[in-house]
Image: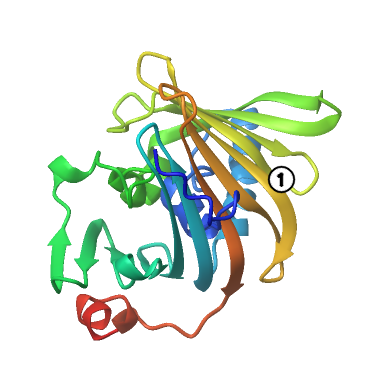
Amino acid sequence: MNDDRNYPARTVPLLALILALLAVFPGGIQAASPGGERARQILAEIDDLWRADSSAATVSMRVVTANYSRAVTMESWSLGKDKSLVRIIAPLKEKGTATLKSGSAIYTYLPKTDRTIRLTSSMMSGSWMGSHFTNDDLVKESRLADDYDPEITFEGVREGRKIIEFALTPRPEAPVVWGRIVTTVLADGYLPLFSSYYDEDGRLARTINFTDLKVMGGRRLPAVMHVVPADKPGEYTELVYEKISFGQPLTEAFFSLQEIRRR
């Protein structure tokens, strides 16, 4: 494994964008019971925390696997729920490499060859930018909100903090990857603490921890997201905000293949 000691131990995220893309806290879920309705309302409020008409951020990502370590710095932009663009700005050998999401389609642009690749269904389970996120994560946002039902499974004090724990279970007809998602938030402000993802057999697949709460872009947010795969001890992907702003004057034309090439 490469040493990669020149990079900081905590790299910087795309957190607002990735949270939206992963739909860790999906809003708009229909619930049948009063408890489920309250869970839906809280999750919708959490979801609003990460959403804006548009956003721009500078993000770094550090990936550690059994075979290598990798660190990149990126700029990211989003417009509404369906358009986002991530571009690597460092290291130099990868500068300009970009991922564009437009609706349910994802494109990767490789500046060295001036080549654009549209990801096919067979490529969706592949790693996104060498991380422990998959390409499939990037297109699940709206469907997860429709396909999972929320339930409050714990509310009270745990480890000295007042928290609320939710379980998200898929509807029988839902075409989803995860068999269950359990997420925990602070009762005060509904800020996320961690989420656990389980496969269809009930086995833990990965966890995401949220730390370093701070005010960024006028909102109090976790600045660090740490993703750990359950089946690969010692591996992780960490994302950390450098900066983020909301309400940017972006247009739909900005999120186009032509714009990626021009820049």
Quadrant housing the C terminus: bottom left
Q: Quadrant of residue 11?
A: bottom right
Query: Is residue 3 or residue 243 the one in the foreground?
Result: 3
Query: As drawn, which residue projects farthest toward the right?
Result: 160
Query: Is residue 127 or residue 156 the one in the foreground?
Result: 127
Q: Which residue appears at 35% of the width and 35% of the height?
A: 67
Colour convention of the picture: rainbow
Q: Is residue 118 above or below residue 194?
A: below
Q: How many marks?
A: 1
Q: Quadrant of residue 87?
A: bottom left
Q: Is residue 239 above or below residue 216?
A: above
* Drawn side of residue 119 relative to residue 62, left or right: left
* Residue count near mark 1 (Cα–Cα under 10 Å), binned few <14, some 14–19, many ≥20: some
Q: Position of residue 119 (x, y in %)?
A: 17, 53
Q: Position of residue 99 (x, y in %)?
A: 30, 63
Dot 1 corresponds to which residue?
190
* Drawn side of residue 217 relative to residue 238, left or right: right
* Drawn side of residue 118 relative to residue 176, left or right: left
Q: Position of residue 198 (x, y in %)?
A: 44, 23
- Secondary structure category for the residue under label 1: loop
**One can see residue 109 in this view:** yes
Question: The disc labelled 1 sits on which kind of residue?
Answer: Tyr
Q: Which residue appears at 48% of the width and 85% of the height?
A: 249
Query: Is residue 149 or residue 166 the one in the foreground?
Result: 166
**One can see residue 53 in this view:** no
Quadrant housing the N terminus: top left
Q: Is residue 169 above or below residue 21?
A: above
Query: Is residue 81 or residue 204 the one in the foreground?
Result: 204
Q: Position of residue 226 (x, y in %)?
A: 56, 41
